[in-house]
Amino acid sequence: TLATSLRNVLRMKQLATDNQEPQKIAGLLNMNPYVLKKNLALWKDFKTNEVESSLRKLLELDLKLKRTRLPEQAGLELWMCSFAHHGH
C-alpha cells in the first residue's frame, strides 16, 4: 500500500507540474478535489524526481527483502529513515 500511495503522489505531482487544472487532476485520479488540494500542500516540498527515487528505492527494497534474510520491519525502517532524510 505504501508503493501505491507513492505512485498516486507521483502521478498527482506530475499532473500538477503539467499545469492541469486541480478539478481535472482530481477527476483523472478519482480523488476528491479537497483531498487533492491537501495532498498537494503536504507534498509541496518534494520534487517529482525525489518521489520517483523514493518509489524506486522502495520497490528495490521489496525485491531485496524477498531475496534475503533481512527482516521486513528492519528493511522498511531503513527505507523510511532514508525517505525522511532525503526529503528534508
Image (tube, rainbow, N blue to C red):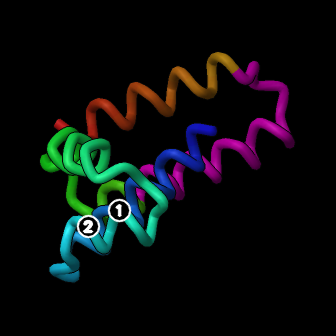
Query: Which amino acid is tagged 1?
Result: Ala
Picture coordinates of residue 63, whole percent (x, y): 76, 49
Question: Looking at the image, can residue 87 be seen?
Answer: no
Is residue 66 one of those drawn in magenta? yes
Query: What range of the chain is rendered magenta?
Result: 53-72
Residue beneath the point at 53% across and 21% down: 77
Q: Which of the image's four quarters has the N terminus?
A: top right
Query: Which amino acid is tagged 2?
Result: Gln
Q: Residues within 10 Å of mark 1 (few under 14, many from 20)?
A: some
Q: For this view, does 6 lie left or right of residue 16?
A: right
Q: Quadrant of residue 26?
A: bottom left
Asked if the residues shown at circle 1 and circle 2 are in contact, with their CB atoms under 8 angstroms apart, the answer is yes
Q: Residues within 10 Å of mark 2 (few under 14, many from 20)?
A: some
Q: Which of the image's four quarters has the C terminus?
A: top left
Residue beneath the point at 39% across and 61% down: 10
Q: Residue at label 2?
A: 23
Q: For this view, does 72 lie left or right of residue 51?
A: right
